[in-house]
Image (cartoon, rainbow, N blue to C red):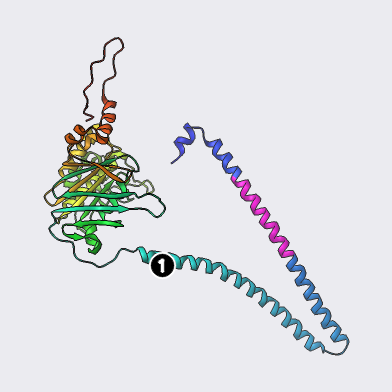
Amino acid sequence: TAAQEVRLHAVGAFLLSRYQRMAESAEAEQERLASSKALTEWVASALSGLAVAATYGTMFWLITAGHMSLAIAGTAVIAVRTGSASLGALVMNVNQLHEESLYVRDHGRFLTQAARRVIPSGGEPVPEQVEEVVLDRVTYRYPDRDTAALDQVSLTLPMGSVTAVVGENGSGKSTLMKILSGLLLPQSGTLRWGPADITGLYRSQVFERVSLLTQDFQRWPVTAAMNIRLGRPAHAVTPEGLGPSVDYAGAGPVIAKLPDGLRSLLARMFRGAIELSGGEWQKVGLARTHWRSSTSQADGVLIVDEPTSALDPEAEIEAFDRIRRLAAPNRAVVLVTHRMSGVRHADRIYVLNAGRLVEQGTHDELIAAQGRYAAMFDAQAAQYAPAPTPGIPNPAAPTVADPA
């Protein structure tokens, strides 16, 4: 996978030199340990040899002095050799037991931590009818961070709405999505599905109500049909039954060019299989999301995180339109993206900065406020503004340009 950069950036010689330095360092350490081991073994062997020589010397003196018969001496030699072998085996077994005990201790610590973090298997059922999902003053901080990833964040997701969440990298968007999906629980504050607090709900039922599409969604090494069906694998379907999801995602041309259509393997590790481009995979991912959403009739949430990063502009506009149409009376859509043209039509936009909610409102309201959202929108819109022609006065550009 690194072949292109190795050749184009000419990093082969550099990487080999770094590898040589690390290999020389590792070999030097191995040589030092081998020398130390050899010295230890030589001393142990010398002491063992002296002990054996002293033992046999004493036995020889006892025989010549008449204090021990030859038969008893032979038995003693066998006993000494057997005891020496057993003692050596005992030492090796004790050493191995010590090494294995370290792994057992680590395994025990892992099981303790896993039991502490396991998702509970019981709880109250999720209400069948949910008018809205509400985060109320939610805070979450990762164990290795000094600052909170989310700090007192509140937002509301009404069913049937399209909600956008925007912000710079590190603003807390991904953490917010994990909490909305139930993967993380708030450390303070509440997440409510209708009137029910998520901490008391049956988490597997919460997961049943959530659909997730991210830019790094899993690309399974199975057939195209199975890649779509894995959105809700328990729901039985024929390849023809996946047609609406394929058409919805605009993945028809992608499937049509595959050698065996939906039955084609999508992994180069298999002979005769094929690999898709990034944009083609995102269409398959959108089809998977549509399949999961279309097979659920209960109220739920669809979370879409940077879904169009590998699509061309025309396909991106179509994808955003399709995603917005996934909003239904029983489904709220949450759109997370850096593409400002994709969020301007959202019913409500929330702006995060350093883990805090700094702005919220419609596109027009946030543009009029001339705050952080307007600054991000203008910065991206400026990339689409025509460049001034030399020698011709540049007319005043509009305050807000449309990046779409």
* 34 in the magenta segment: yes
Residue 288 or 182: which is nearer the viewer?
A: 182
Give percent across and percent down for residue 382.
28, 26
Count of marks overlaid on the render: 1
Give percent across and percent down for residue 283.
25, 42
Left or right: 106, with 87 as reference point: left
Rendered image quadrant of residue 88: bottom right
Q: Secondary structure at mark 1?
A: helix
Q: Where does the magenta region start and end?
A: 22-42
Residue 279 or 135: which is nearer the viewer?
A: 135
Give percent across and percent down for residue 92.
62, 71
Magenta part mainly helix, strand or loop?
helix
Task: Please tell me which residue is depicted at 51% across the width and 66% down the height of the picture.
Answer: 103
Residue 128 or 400: which is nearer the viewer?
A: 400
Task: Please tell me which residue is depicted at 74% across the width and 68% down the height of the picture.
Answer: 45
Farthest residue toward the left? 329
Task: Please tell me which residue is depicted at 79% across the width and 88% down the height of the picture.
Answer: 71
- In this figure, which residue is indicated by the disc labeled 1? 112
Give percent across and percent down for residue 175.
31, 50
User: Does residue 293 appear in this view?
Assistant: yes
